């Protein structure tokens, strides 16, 4: 069994919610990479994207994932785009049981359509953007994970936590 659990998946897939519950259920520390970036930078992600650009944000993300994944007994909720950087996946795979929250596009859209804090969705047609990004990233999520859990609008988050917990313990 690896020391940590890392949650990957598209924005709105439930990484933060499931991560908190999973950490509590397994008596592990919880870290949300996006929240760490906001804390360290002392500004919202939208501002980081606006003023410094996505590449600056991705460099911060890489640095924090590398640092946090060296810790033990931790549940790490990554950002939705963390998997586009091979260094992130390498850091996570070395120390973590990587779980893909495979959320349906319609569920993602319902969860994020009214959110303003997601810089990649500050566009006119959010649904089309979600579909395009999701299709680009889907294969990366699939090949990067040790375990995948399907998520939709009817999914019970506590059942999801139990599925991950059981698979992790048996890994």
Image: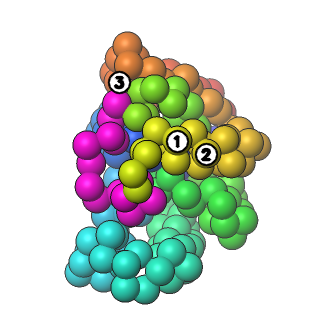
N-terminal label among 3 and 2 = 2
Q: Are marks 1 and 2 in contact (CB under 8 Å)?
A: yes
Task: Look at the image and tell me whether residue 32 can be seen.
Answer: no
Nearer to us in this view, 127 or 17: 127
Q: CA distance from mark 3 to mark 2?
A: 26 Å
> Seen from this angle, which residue lies furthest bottom?
52
Q: CA distance from mark 1 to mark 3?
A: 27 Å
- Compared across the picture, whether 36 is left or right of 146 comes to left
Asked whether residue 118 is drawn in magenta, I would say yes
Which residue: 66% across, 66% down?
A: 85
> Seen from this angle, which residue lies furthest top?
154
Determine whether 154 is above or below 68 in the image.
above
- Compared across the picture, whether 31 is left or right of 102 comes to left
Q: Which residue is mark 3?
A: 157
Residue 6 picture location, percent across and down: 53, 49
Nearer to us in this view, 36 or 85: 85
Which residue: 45% across, 21% down?
A: 152
Residue 131 picture location, percent across and down: 57, 39
Q: CA distance from mark 1 to mark 2?
A: 6 Å
Kindly identify which numbered label has been placed on residue 128: 1
Q: Secondary structure at mark 1?
A: helix
- Highlighted magenta segment, given as a residue range: 110-122
Residue 118 picture location, percent across and down: 36, 57
Determine whether 33 is above or below 19 in the image.
below
Task: Look at the image and tell me whether residue 12 can be seen.
Answer: yes
Residue 54 picture location, percent across and down: 51, 75
N-terminal label among 1 and 3 = 1
Asked whether residue 90 is drawn in magenta, I would say no
Determine whether 124 is above or below 152 in the image.
below
């Amino acid at each position: 069994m690896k020391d940590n659990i890392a949650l990957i998946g598209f924005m709105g897939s439930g990484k933060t919610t499931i991560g908190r519950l999973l950490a509590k259920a397994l008596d592990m520390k919880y870290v949300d990479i996006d929240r760490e970036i906001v804390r360290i930078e002392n500004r919202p992600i939208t501002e980081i994207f606006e003023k410094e650009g996505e590449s600056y944000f991705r460099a911060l993300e890489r640095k924090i994932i590398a640092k946090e994944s060296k810790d033990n007994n931790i549940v790490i909720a990554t950002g939705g785009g963390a998997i586009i950087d091979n260094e992130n996946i390498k850091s996570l795979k070395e120390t973590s049981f990587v779980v893909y929250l495979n959320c349906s596009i319609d569920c993602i859209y319902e969860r994020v359509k009214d959110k303003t804090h997601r810089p990649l969705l500050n566009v006119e047609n959010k649904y089309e953007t979600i579909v395009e990004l999701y299709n680009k990233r889907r294969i990366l999520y699939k090949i990067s994970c040790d375990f995948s859990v399907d998520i939709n609008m009817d999914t019970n988050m506590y059942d999801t936590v139990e599925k991950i917990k059981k698979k992790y313990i048996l890994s």
